[in-house]
Image (cartoon, coloured by chain):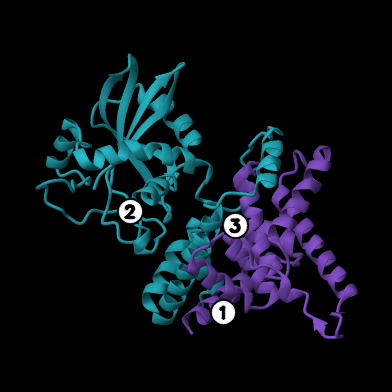
Chain colours: A cyan, B purple
């Protein structure tokens, strides 16, 4: 008998990996558990949105001033390895600003529809799991990376961009792949330690070596389409990383659609 | 993860405060009080691993103080001897910060629930881990936190659906 708190944790993506399969099977086999799972997913989304909305509002002046004081404390941010993973905390709001900054770039991309590099097209024709959704490319159902759903009306650009950051913490991600990037061949896949909500390891593919503003850069892509909202059929995400002061930094993100 | 202290940290406290005050007090006042407390005890809390829990506990304390003060002076009467309902005079904060109708609906539904549910749902919405929620709520076991959250979410779904 599956405890309903396990269903809740499963819906939130907080259930330990080793228990997920058992719970998933139980949900698939029992309509009542499926209903319960839907209840938890729905309320999880509601609570998540609740928090999001408050964060979108400006603070009164006196609290803004206090925020500045707290910021000046310069606390070291240390990962607490013993703390259990919690979905609601997954989305890092500190990235919202970065995401917003990316928006201008993305909007240009939407209109010009020039996200895919030549190499990307090659990937598509080589029966890669990355299936193009541009122009006349045939849309197939790819094996998607799974993530938490959002209501359809949140299928706006800003939300989708922000949701990319659900797949990784930028700093950790860069640290992890920095050493791997140098030795990669074009179209070579590499695995990272980051996982989607179902514990699947996320892979990336090197698309291109290039120079941007005299900086050595790498164009990489998620090796599979990723789901950025509930109604997203799969989005191709390409990242540009450029070397600044001997370390790679994320300089742009391009998303298809 | 140590909480990053910035605007979003304070906005998280506002969200939790909205659940604590239930329209009976100004959440900004609670947040302001809690943050002032942190700032004035910088040496003690600067490196605290769970500073949000400290702030939330402080907000709860401040809220209880406010209620006590109100009870101390109420019922108030006007010149004609009619009772003045102090609570009704409070401004609805959800109007003040122009939240969406959907937010108001969820929040008003949560307000209909018991104190324990209101608290744990707002804490959960802020991404607190079970351990953090246990610390803030004072519940003895993690299992109780889990089952309380699970029951409250089922109740929320039921109320939202009805």
Residue A99, x across and y down, in percent: 42, 41
CA neighbours of label 3 inside 10 A, class few (<14), some (14 to 19), many (20+): many
Q: Local crowd at mark 1 within 10 Å, few (<14), some, or many (≥20)? A: some
Q: Are marks 2 and 1 on the same chain?
A: no
Residue A188 image-quadrant placement = top left
Q: CA distance from mark 2 to mark 3?
A: 23 Å
Disc number placed over residue B155 in the picture, else none: 1
Q: Residue furthest top?
A: A214
User: Can residue A244 be seen at all in this image of the molecule?
Assistant: yes
For label 3, the SS is loop
Provide residue B55's location: percent of width, then percent of height. 74, 52
Which chain is mark 3 on?
B
Report the mark closest to the observer, 2 or 3.
3
> As displayed, is residue B121 above or below residue B128?
below
Which residue sits at x=48%, y=44%?
Answer: A96
Q: Chain of mark 2?
A: A
Separation (CA) of disc 2 from disc 1: 29 Å
Report which residue position mark 3 lands on. B126
Q: Secondary structure under badge 1?
A: helix
Q: Which residue is mark 2?
A: A227
Q: What percent of the width, then of the height, locates residue B125? A: 57, 61
- Could you tell whether A172 is left or right of A102 in the image? right
Disc assigned to residue A155: none
* Residue at image point 38% right, 37% down: A102
Other residues around mark 2 within 10 Å, as few (<14) / some (14–19) / many (≥20) = many
């Amino acid at each position: 008998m599956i405890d309903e708190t396990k269903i809740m944790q499963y819906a939130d993506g907080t259930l330990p990996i080793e228990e997920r399969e058992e719970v998933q099977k139980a949900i698939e086999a029992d309509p009542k558990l499926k209903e319960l799972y839907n209840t938890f997913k729905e309320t999880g989304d509601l609570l998540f949105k609740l928090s999001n909305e408050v964060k979108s509002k400006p603070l009164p002046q006196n609290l803004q001033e206090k925020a500045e004081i707290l910021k000046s404390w310069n606390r070291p941010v240390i990962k607490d390895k013993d703390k259990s993973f919690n979905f609601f905390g997954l989305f890092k709001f500190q990235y919202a600003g970065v995401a917003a900054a990316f928006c201008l770039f993305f909007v240009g991309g939407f209109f010009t529809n020039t996200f895919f590099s030549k190499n990307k097209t090659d990937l598509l024709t080589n029966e890669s799991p990355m299936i193009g959704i541009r122009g006349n490319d045939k849309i197939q159902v790819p094996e998607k990376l799974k993530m938490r759903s959002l209501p359809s009306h949140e299928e706006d650009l800003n939300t989708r961009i922000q949701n990319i950051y659900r797949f990784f913490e930028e700093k950790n991600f860069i640290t992890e792949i920095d050493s791997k990037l140098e030795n990669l061949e074009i179209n070579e896949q590499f695995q990272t330690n980051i996982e989607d909500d179902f514990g699947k390891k996320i892979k990336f593919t090197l698309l291109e070596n290039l120079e941007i503003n005299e900086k050595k850069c790498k164009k990489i892509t998620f090796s599979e389409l990723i789901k950025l909202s509930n109604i997203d059929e799969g989005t191709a995400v390409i990242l540009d990383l450029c070397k600044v002061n001997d370390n790679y930094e994320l300089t742009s993100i391009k998303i298809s659609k | 993860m140590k909480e990053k202290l910035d605007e979003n940290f304070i906005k998280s406290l506002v969200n939790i405060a909205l659940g604590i005050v239930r329209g009976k007090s100004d959440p900004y006042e609670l947040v302001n009080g809690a943050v002032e407390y942190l700032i004035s005890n910088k040496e003690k809390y600067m490196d605290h691993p769970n500073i949000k829990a400290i702030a939330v506990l402080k907000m709860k304390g401040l809220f209880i103080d406010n209620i006590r003060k109100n009870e101390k002076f109420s019922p108030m009467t006007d010149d004609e001897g009619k009772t003045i309902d102090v609570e009704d005079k409070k401004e609805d904060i959800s109007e003040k910060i122009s939240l969406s109708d959907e937010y108001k609906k969820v929040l008003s539904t949560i307000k209909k629930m018991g104190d324990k549910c209101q608290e744990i749902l707002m804490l959960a919405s802020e991404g607190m881990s079970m351990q953090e929620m246990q610390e803030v709520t004072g519940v003895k076991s993690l299992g109780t936190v889990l089952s309380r959250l699970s029951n409250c979410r089922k109740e929320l779904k039921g109320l939202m659906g009805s």
